[in-house]
Image (cartoon, coloured by chain):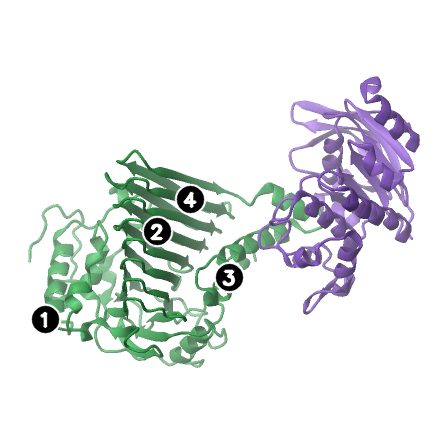
Chain colours: A green, B purple
Amino acid sequence: MTRASLRERPAVLSNFTPESAAALSGPAWLQQRRCAAADAFWSSPLPSEKDEVWRYSRIDQLDLDRFRPAGSVSVTAPDDPGPSPSERIHTLVSSLGARAGLVVTINGVLATVASSVPDHLATLGRATERADAETFVGSVGSDPRDFWLLNDAFAIDPVLVDVQPGAVVEDPIVIVHMITGVGGTAIFPRTVIRTGTGSSVGVIEIVIDVDTGLLADLPSDGVRAPNRPLEHLVVPATELQLAEEAALDYVSVQSLGAETWQLAHQASFIGANATLRSFAVALGGKYARLRTDSALAGEGGTSMLRAAYIGRDEQMLDFRTLQDHLAPRTTSDLLFTGAVADRSHSVYSGLIRVRRGAVRSDAMQTNHNLVLGEGAHADSVPNLDIEENDVKCSHGSTVGPVDEDQRYYLESRGIEPERAEQLIVSGFFESIADQVPIAGTRSLIGRALVDRVGVHGE
Amino acid sequence: MSTGELVIEGLRAGIPGREILRGVTLTVRSGEVHAVMGPNGSGKSTLAHVLMGRPGYEVLDGSVTLDGIDLLSLPTWQRARAGLFLAMQHPVEVPGVTLIESLTAARPGVPAEEIGATDAGIGERLHEEARRIGFDERFLDRPLNVDLSGGERKRNETLQMGVLRPRFAVLDEIDSGLDVDALGAVGRRVEEATAEWGLGVLAITHFRRLLDVLHPDVVHVLSEGRVVATGGSQLAEIVDRTGYAAYV
């Protein structure tokens, strides 16, 4: 173990040491990698707001000593007078309509695997049950690696969705990462989605604190919402590997508690003529960061990246994106849209990078922010780094209140200003939810967004 | 049948730093149709927006009352509740907000069936209004004005007027974007409203063709922010023949 002399804070990461990573069970290669990752995290300086990639964030306020990594032993939820967490997850999952398979983890430990898809089309479950897991877990990454390393070190049960070449899986596969139990737990969900050549599949990944009621379809009675929400550290990492000609629709929903820190990564590798359509929804968290990296590595690949978010109270929602064009004739189209209410804060910072040789690439990057509260604030920083001439790139962002013409139009019909704003904002998010690639999720996401914004001003 | 009047007196208004209306005076009574004609820049649209209270305009002097209620002291939504309606020249798209949602929010105290809403969604009232003006009933489900052509938006404005039944309606170039058939249907609907519930109309237009279907009782020519001529429908014919030059 090496200790870096350039560490800026004297934090003693007693809970995240290579030793504690090594104590987690798993095959030898995984244990070795956990140690190496913990070591690498431990020996590099902690992220700081002085770093450009952490500018505007709240990372300096994160005190890792307040958390300890979740163990391999499954937790039992504390006594709850209402529906049990599994009943509530069942309700949530049922609302998504028909599905081809379901994977549930509880605090990073695999709890349920159910599939109606034959193995020759797709398999899902614990990645480490596959003999060749070492070759594909971690093959897609993100740079800088910072918290990705921490996930490498402390992920317990990496989940695998493996779609065979040519397979067409009609209904989506649902992955739910449940966060529950005592406060101070650090949880590291890890998902690897591999889509074979010419295959087609939809995957919904939900990270949810079952002690909160943020998702509209969770029954609200019996929810321990009146209690002070528990503080967790949640560090999900998802790898999307698209082989040639593959099509993946990927919808992710973050519904964490109001005191939780999230440091999430979604990294995709887009093969030749493959198409990713991804949509991320951010609802909860005290500080919730999502890094989205898409490497367009094969000629003719396409990456459509969408996100919708709503900040409330003192919350900060933080998005960093990279559209990395490595191959010719690649297309990326990013649209992140959100609202900040109360005293919340959102950050969008994105980079389009077109590498030399990625000729005739087409990249778009757009970020729209509605500012709904006097104390709310949105930062939006689009960036381009173009090394090739024969390309088409555009970027733009807006930060502002509800459109004045729309408001005047509704008011001219006799609608009170507060109600007009509510209608415009909820309509805006409903129309965004209509663009979610997996149709079965649209109503849940639409209602969750509208609910989240609807209590505004009440 | 309502009786009452919309009285505009000595109205001076504009945008900060520029006076556009320089003293407009006219009175519309219930059941009457008044036309306001005038060249570009004469202040016609400013008049419409000042009456409705659009942000960005300021009133310098004068008064506007609807059945004695001082409209200028009210915010836009209360002017609408007091009985004023503005059919906009450029109705904007409001994504995700449906006609039913906006109409119910516009008249929270009114029973749902009166504005064409039912538990299942769109009720008979709305279908009937749509049929009367040839508004494609498939559009009733659409978010407000989203993906509607200019002409469809004008029909949508007319439809909302028919459902909300205001005391007075200001029609800001409702004829633009409408073909002859649509213009006929919209004009007929407005004219029928004057008889059905005594709607008073202030129709702002560039062109006489609207007036051929609306049959105004009174025509006003607006020029440089003032009413420079007032007469019967023959005034519209004169303007149509000789242009506005004589009034500028």
Mark 4 chain: A
Q: SS at mark 3?
A: helix
Write down the residue under mark 4: A366
Q: Which mark is residue A28?
A: 1
| Same chain, labels 1 and 3 | yes
Residues under labels 3 and 4: Cα distance? 21 Å
| Same chain, labels 2 and 3 | yes
Disc with the residue nearer the chain's start (2 vs 3):
2
In the visual, does A173 lie left or right of A67? right
Tell me the residue at 79%/60% (across/down).
Answer: B128
Q: Which mark is residue A302?
A: 2
Select label 2 or label 3 by which is in front.
2
| Amino acid type, label 2 | Thr
Tell me the residue at 44%/54% (across/down).
Answer: A308
Locate the C terminus of chain B by quadrant.
top right
Q: SS at mark 2?
A: strand
Select label 4 or label 2 by which is in front.
2
| Same chain, labels 3 and 4 | yes
Q: Report if the CB atoms under discs 1 and 3 are less than 8 Å apart.
A: no
In the visual, does A93 lie left or right of A389? right
| Same chain, labels 1 and 4 | yes
Q: Quadrant of residue A33?
A: bottom left
Q: Find residue A416 and report its horizontal and vertical position in percent.
A: 67, 51
In the visual, does B131 lie left or right of A8? right
